């Protein structure tokens, strides 16, 4: 089931407004799947998707809607549904709300009125602990109004479309990756790159040891000046944010070396990750070419579409792809190759990212551009 256009506009508008406040939080919202549902009071999450009542959302002031969506996305990103285990549900929801509402307030947004912590005074000490620690601290406290404020769902609402079955840990892993990408984008936007709100134990608990190649790819595509940071806020108030985004689009040319030095798994991994970027950033568009001593394409890359079958298989010459740049005029070039081939004499005008599988050419062998290495 495809969400109605008005619902999509509400979500897109909220994402843009939050982007003007925080690149970190906006990136998390870009990863979230928002699903309309009449069966939630206002919004809720099962840890994978965020369910929003479209009628309620349409009647909320913009800043209240932004706070509501960020509240639910943070619950999902911090795995508050999966981590409850056998604990008492209402007290767990209060503990999770206390932490998340502190983050929403720090982002300059109002706390959702239906959350269990909406009327409670802030506690700056508890807000920065883990949800398990807050749960213990709240033992014995009475909160009679909690019956109507449970937004951590054990299962999807009855009117929600079915989800693709996933292994139990996959949602948590995907959100951890989203947090890594949020930190990376935040750092490129002038933030700290780790936690925009200070020392929150919840975020530190989920911090990955390092950014993997996927996070660096997102960083490369998200740091352009035509990202949401350069968007004219006046369009949002006039309801024209989607149309204006079309004029602010970023185009990427993705080239894949099919000379035999790059295996199919690396091709699928890179192209699938680029498709993930396209799904999260509506202003990014990408064209794919395969290449050996010639260029084969173009193929239009879209989120969810199957990866086009590779073409070619001869020697390696990078120059045919670079000759296409004058025609396509992309904003960025991403080239998957082991690096052993003929480079053009003159560097291109646009940023170039070389994605290199294990065993590829050393960094200093590339005459220009950035080098990103896939893991062993």
Image (cartoon, rainbow, N blue to C red):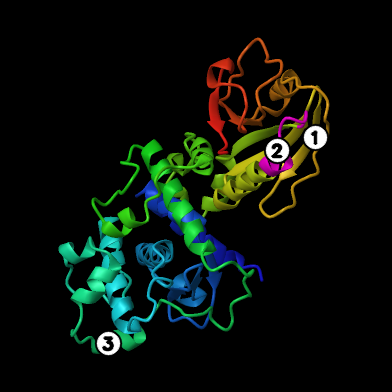
> Is residue 265 highlighted in magenta?
yes
Q: CA distance from mark 1 to mark 2?
A: 9 Å
Give the residue at mark 1: 297
Q: Secondary structure at mark 2?
A: strand
**Span of residues in magenta:** 258-267
The x and y percentages for residue 101 are 28, 66
The x and y percentages for residue 197 are 26, 52
Q: Residue at x 25, y 89 (%)?
A: 144
- Residue 274 is labelled as none
Q: Secondary structure at mark 3?
A: helix
Residue 165 visible (yes or no): yes
Give the residue at mark 2: 287
Q: Earlier in the sequence, mark 3 or mark 2?
A: 3
Q: Quadrant of the C terminus?
A: top right
Q: Is residue 228 above or below residue 117?
A: above
Quadrant position of residue 76? bottom left
The x and y percentages for residue 291 are 77, 29
Q: CA distance from mark 3 to mark 1?
A: 60 Å
Contact, mark 1 vs mark 2 (Cβ under 8 Å): yes
Q: Secondary structure at mark 1?
A: strand
């Amino acid at each position: 089931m495809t969400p109605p256009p008005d619902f999509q506009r509400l979500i897109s508008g909220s994402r843009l407004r939050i982007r003007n406040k925080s690149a970190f939080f906006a990136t998390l919202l870009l990863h979230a799947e928002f699903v309309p549902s009449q069966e939630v009071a206002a919004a809720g999450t099962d840890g994978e998707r965020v369910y929003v009542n479209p009628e309620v959302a349409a009647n909320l002031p913009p800043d209240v809607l932004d706070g509501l969506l960020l509240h639910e996305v943070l619950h999902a990103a911090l795995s508050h549904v999966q981590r409850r285990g056998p604990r008492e549900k209402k007290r767990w929801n209060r503990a999770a709300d206390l932490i998340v509402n502190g983050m929403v307030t720090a982002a300059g947004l109002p706390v959702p009125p239906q959350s269990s912590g909406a009327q409670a005074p802030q506690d700056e000490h508890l807000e920065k602990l883990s949800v398990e620690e807050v749960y213990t601290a709240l033992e014995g406290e009475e909160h009679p109004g909690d019956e109507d404020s449970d937004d951590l769902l054990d299962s999807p609402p009855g009117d929600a479309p079915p989800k693709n079955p996933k292994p139990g840990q996959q949602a948590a892993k995907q959100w951890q990756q989203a947090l890594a990408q949020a930190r990376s984008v935040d750092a490129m936007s002038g933030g700290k790159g780790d936690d925009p709100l200070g020392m929150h134990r919840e975020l530190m608990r989920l911090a990955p040891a390092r950014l993997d190649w996927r996070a660096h790819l997102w960083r490369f595509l998200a740091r352009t000046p035509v990202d949401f940071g350069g968007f004219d806020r006046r369009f949002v108030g006039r309801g024209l944010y989607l149309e204006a985004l079309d004029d602010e689009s970023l185009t990427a040319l993705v080239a894949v070396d099919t000379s035999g030095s790059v295996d199919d798994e690396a091709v699928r991994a890179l192209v699938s990750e680029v498709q993930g970027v396209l799904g999260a950033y509506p202003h990014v568009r990408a064209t794919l070419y395969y290449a050996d001593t010639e260029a084969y394409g173009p193929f239009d890359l879209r989120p969810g579409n199957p990866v086009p079958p590779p073409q070619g298989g001869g020697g390696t010459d990078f120059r045919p792809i670079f000759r296409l740049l004058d025609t396509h005029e992309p904003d960025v070039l991403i080239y998957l190759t082991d690096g052993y081939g003929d480079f053009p004499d003159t560097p291109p005008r646009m940023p170039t990212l070389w994605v290199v599988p294990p065993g590829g050419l050393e960094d200093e062998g590339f005459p220009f551009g950035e080098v990103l290495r896939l893991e062993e």
